[in-house]
Image: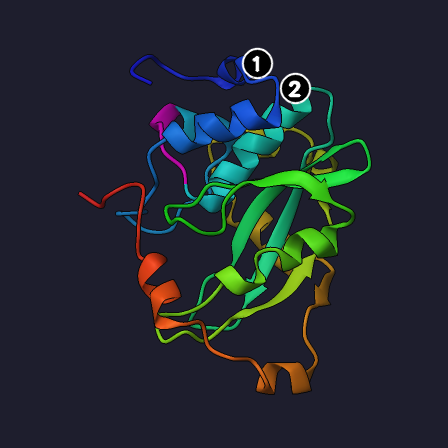
Amino acid sequence: MKKQMGISTLKRFDTPQKIQSFLNRLPFNFEKHGQTHRSVAEALKRKKAHCFEGALIAAAALQLQGRPPLLLDLKTVRPDFDHVVALFKEGKYWGAISKTNHNVLRYRDPIYRDVRELAMSYFNEYFLADGTKTLRKYSKPFDLSKYGTVWIDSKENLVWLAHKLDKSPHANILTPKQVRNLRPADRIEVNASGLTEWKRR
């Protein structure tokens, strides 16, 4: 991790598992100087990433393997934050690569029959400190190949791309009645979710 990293670095990670292991080693971007939506090249140059930037890195690595560069947006109710992962398929089954600083919302093995099933695997992990469950929507697979290489090599803040993802077609997970009947996460679950991988300096 001490050497300069570029796009060519990703060629070494020829399976989704290896891509995930690389992202786990990459320090978390705490955005100390304001919000960032860095391209793959810029995130690798700075050797840190948050979930959106990590998903772009994973998508680029998957594209180098000849796979489509797809994102999945998991949308919550405020004050919680959305989460973005990179999607991949092994045969008929979906999996996900995820950059997160917590012990939840992480990698998903390719065992899910469709994107909804995969998105639902995150539902019970997604809650606030008071136990309120917050996941409400998931996007259709968002194809980055429609945007050329700008998401890979741009030096500009890609906030516009994050907005495109946010405004892309999403499916609801719950009915209003189901929302009303949700049981909060148990205290032991909330306490366990406080474990983090990287510490803010």
Q: Which quadrant of the view contains residue 199?
A: top left
Q: Which amino acid does label 2 sit on?
A: Leu
For the point 52% across and 54% down, the residue is 83
Q: Name the residue under label 1.
A: 11
**If the image is split into quadrants, where does the N terminus sit?**
top left
Drawn side of residue 97 relative to residue 6, left or right: right
Q: Is residue 200 left or right of residue 78?
A: left
Q: In which quarter of the image is residue 180?
A: bottom right
Q: Distance between the residues labelled 2 and 1?
A: 7 Å
Disc 1, SS: helix
Q: Is residue 42 visible?
A: no
Marks 2 and 1 in Cβ contact (< 8 Å): yes
The residue labelled by disc 2 is 64
Q: Total label count?
A: 2
Name the secondary structure under disc 2: helix
Q: Residue 27: percent from the left, percent from the top?
A: 33, 34
Which numbered disc, 2 or 1, marks the residue that appears first in the sequence?
1
Three-letter code for the amino acid on which mark 1 is drawn: Lys
The magenta span reads: 45-49
Label at residue 73: none
Q: Which residue is drawn at 33% across and 12% down?
A: 3
Could you tell me which residue is drawn at 73 percent across and 26 percent down? 67
* Outermost residue to the right: 92
Q: Where is residue 135 in the image (x, y as percent from the top left)?
A: 56, 67
Residue placed at 35% from the left, 71% from the top? 187
Closer to the camera in the image, 160 or 22: 22
